[in-house]
Image: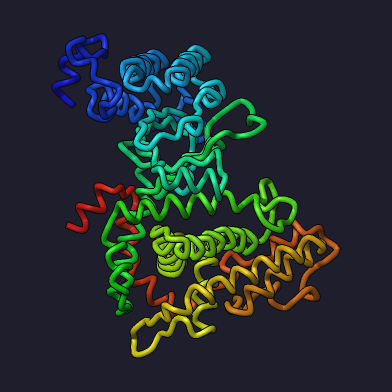
Amino acid sequence: MTEILVQLGVEGKVPPEKVGGSPESRVVEHPAWPLLKAAVEEVRPWQQKDGSIDFAADGAPSKAVAELTLDRAISAVEQLSPLLPHDAAYHSALVADLRRWAEEGFQVPDFLDSLLAFQPAANREDGLQHLVVFPMYTQNGNPDRNLEAVVLRMVWPEWLAELEATRYDNPLFCGITFEDFTAGYDTNSAVLFPETIAVREAPERFSWGGIFCDREAARFRAVTEASVGILGLELPDDIREMVSDQDRCQQAFVLWDMVHDRTHSHGDLPFDPFMIKQRQPFWMYGLEELRCDLTAFKEAVKLEADGFPQGRDVQYAVLFDRMFRFPVTGERVRNYDGLGGQLLFAYLHKHDVVRWTDNKLQIDWERAPQVTNQLCAEIEKLYRDGIDRPKLVHWFAAYDLVSQYLSPHPGSRWAKGPDALDLSLPPRKLVDDVLPDEFPLSMFYEALSKKLKNVIASTKGITAAGAEQAAA
C-alpha cells in the first residue's frame, strides 16, 4: 500500500504501467482497489448518520480535503471500471453521483441515478464480478448511511439457474460472495439490498436483492461445529461432510435464500407479509421469517426426492442454523429471528424429534423432515385463517400458536389475554404493551448461549477465506 501511494505522487492516480488487466482479472488485485478502499475509509468517519458531512463538527476535515479524498475515490473507480464492462453504465452514473455530492456541499447524499443504473439481476452469470460503491447502511451491521465499497461475485451455477427458471421463479434474486469490502461489512451484515441506499426518493419497485451466501455458510459452519461438540450430537456422515465443506454449504445457502426470498410473496398471505411500514408485535415478524425458512425446508425435501443433493443439505442448514445460531445471536430486544429458532426447537422437542438427555442432544433424523413440515403447515393455516380475521384477532391467534410451545414472560400483559389490554386503543398502540423479550430463552438456551457466545462473536465479518483459515 505504501509503495503504491509513493508511486501515485500528488495526483492520486496509478501509473499507466500499473493499469490494465483483462476483464477476467480480480478487481481486488488491481492497484486501484486499495486506493479506493482507503479513500472510502477516510470519508466514512466524517459522515453523519444520514450520510452528510458537517464541516463544523469535531474531527471534520475542510471541504477542500473532503473533495480531494473523494477525487481519489472517483479516480480509482474510473481505473477499475474497464475490468467490469457489464457495469459501465452504473460506474458512469456512480461517478456523476459522487461528483454531484461534492458539488452540493456533501449534504445528504442522493445516489438514485446510480442505483437505477446498477442491474446485477439482469445478467446472473456465475462468477461475474461487480464493484459497488454506495452511501448505505448495512443491515445487521452499521445503521448509518456511510459510503461503502464492496467487490463481489455472482453465484449462479447452472443447476440453480434451471431451478429458478422451472420451479422457483425469482428474477430479482442475486446469490453473491465477498471479494473485499469496507468497514460497514466488517460486521454481521450478509445482504446487499437497494432499500438501504441513500436516495432522494424510493423507486417504484426494486430490481434486485443480493445475499452473501459465503458469509452465511461460513458462520453456519463455525456455530454448527461448536454446537455439535458442546451438545455431543452425532451427525450422519453425509451431514458431517457438508458442515466441513465451505463450497457445499454455500450451494445450500444460495438455494435456501432463493426459495426463502420468493416465499415472502407466495402462499395464502395477509395483505402485506413483508409488513413494510407496519407496526406489529415482533412475533409476527418471527413467524413470517420462519414460514419462509420452513417453506424452503419443505421444498428441499421435495428436491432431495427428485435427486438434487442440495435438497438434503438445505434441510440440515435450516435445522441447525435455526436451532443453534439464531436463538442465541444478537440482543434479546424484539429478536424475531431468535424467536423463530426457539419455536422450531421447542416444536421438535415436544414432538420427540429432538431429545436432551444425559447432557447430549439426540435427533430422530428419519422423523425430522415430517415434523418440521408439520410446523410449516400450522403456520400456513394461521396465515390462511388470518385472511378472514381482524388484525388484532390475528395477532392474538399468532400469540396463541407461539405460546403453545414457548413460555411467555411471567409479567406479560399479552399472555393474560385481551382483558388485560386497553382494546379502545388502535392495534399499533397495543404493541407498546409487548415486552422487549416477550418469550425469554429456556434454560437449555441460556446454558447454550454462554458456551457459544465467543464463537458467535468470532463470526463478525467472517468470509469464506476466514472460515477455511479457522478450519485449518
**Residue in the picture at 24% in, 24% down:** 30
| Vertical position of residue 391 compared to residue 91: above or below | below
Side (left or right) of 190 relative to 193 = left
| Vertical position of residue 282 compared to residue 409: above or below | above
In which quadrant of the rendered image does the C terminus lie? bottom left
Q: Nearer the viewer, residue 379 or 32?
A: 379
Q: Which residue occupies the extreme bottom position in the image?
A: 358
| Vertical position of residue 86 compared to residue 328: above or below | above
Name the spot of residue 382 as percent of width and height, x first: 70, 67
**Residue in the picture at 20% in, 11% down:** 15
Is residue 117 among the parts visible in the rendering?
yes
Is residue 69 among the parts visible in the rendering?
no
Side (left or right) of 42 relative to 270 = left
Q: Which residue occupies the extreme right position in the image?
A: 424
Name the spot of residue 126 as percent of width and height, x first: 37, 37
In which quadrant of the rendered image does the N terminus lie? top left
Which quarter of the figure has residue 423? bottom right
| Vertical position of residue 372 compared to residue 146: above or below | below
Side (left or right) of 21 relative to 417 = left
Q: Which residue occupies the extreme front position in the image?
A: 306
Its colouring scheme is rainbow
Q: Nearer the viewer, residue 389 or 294?
A: 294
**Residue in the picture at 72% in, 65% down:** 395
**Residue in the picture at 30% in, 78% down:** 234
Name the spot of residue 212 as percent of width and height, x first: 40, 45
Side (left or right) of 42 relative to 441 = left
Q: How many numbered markers are drawn?
A: 0
Name the spot of residue 445 as percent of width and height, x first: 43, 75
Q: Nearer the viewer, residue 198 or 66?
A: 198
